[in-house]
Amino acid sequence: MPLPARPIHALTAALACTALLAACAPQADDGATTEQTKPFDGIAADEIITLSGTEPFWGMTIDKSVATYTTPDNPDGSVFEVSRFAGNSGLGFSGKLAGADVAITVTPGACSDGMSDRSYPFTATVKLGEDNLNGCGYTDKQGFTGDAAP
């Protein structure tokens, strides 16, 4: 009996997030991946995550299981549900927005948006359908440094 289409899409998005998180695994000096057994716990489940990127400009806020995706053409944003999971090197989220699979990866590491003097504590990668978006992130408890209104 074939599986319903929705679980297959959710599984595909979850697998994409897992692959992205695995690619970000810490490397040993000899290039081998170091083994970690503890899931990433650098962002608590109750922290509100804010992500943004340039070229193209986009933004996303994740609050528990709800994400809001914004663009200059849609400043009010589109709201969709996400599932969260912790990998060895960061967080992954998966969901669906307007019929497109969404895979979000948030990993620790200094990040610059390239347009301001801000420094962010997280990097972000978003696969939205066929589009790949890159950016930076922070949380309500782990903010960026630099000018609040550049």
Image (spheres, rainbow, N blue to C red):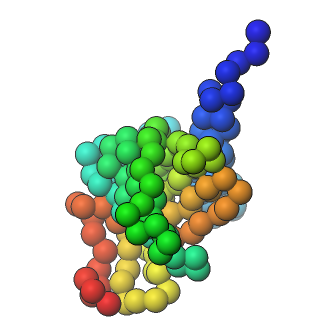
Q: In the rendered view, would you say 96 is above or below 50?
A: above
Q: Residue at x 37, y 41 (%)?
A: 65
- Residue 103 shows in this picture: yes
Looking at the image, residue 118 lies above or below residue 84: below
Q: Residue at x 45, y 55 (%)?
A: 78
- Rendered residue at 47%/81% (across/down): 113
- On the image, the x and y values in percent for residue 118 come to 36, 84
**Residue in the foreground of this view, choosing between 136 and 57:** 57
What is the x, y in percent for residue 76? 38, 63
Residue located at (54% from left, 48% from top) = 97
Classify residue 109 as left or right of residue 142: right
**x%, y% of residue 77?**
42, 60
Of 69 and 44, which appears nearest the observer?
69
Considering depth in this image, is 71 or 86 the residue closer to the camera?
A: 71
Residue that extends furthest to the top in the rendered view of this protein: 1
* Residue found at the very far right of the displayed protein: 1
Question: Is 133 above or below relative to 15?
Answer: below
Quarter of the figure with the N terminus: top right
Number of disc labels: 0
Q: Position of residue 14 (x, y in %)?
A: 60, 39
Q: Quadrant of the C terminus?
A: bottom left
The answer to whether one can see residue 136 in this image is no
In the displayed structure, 43 sits above or below 142; it is: above
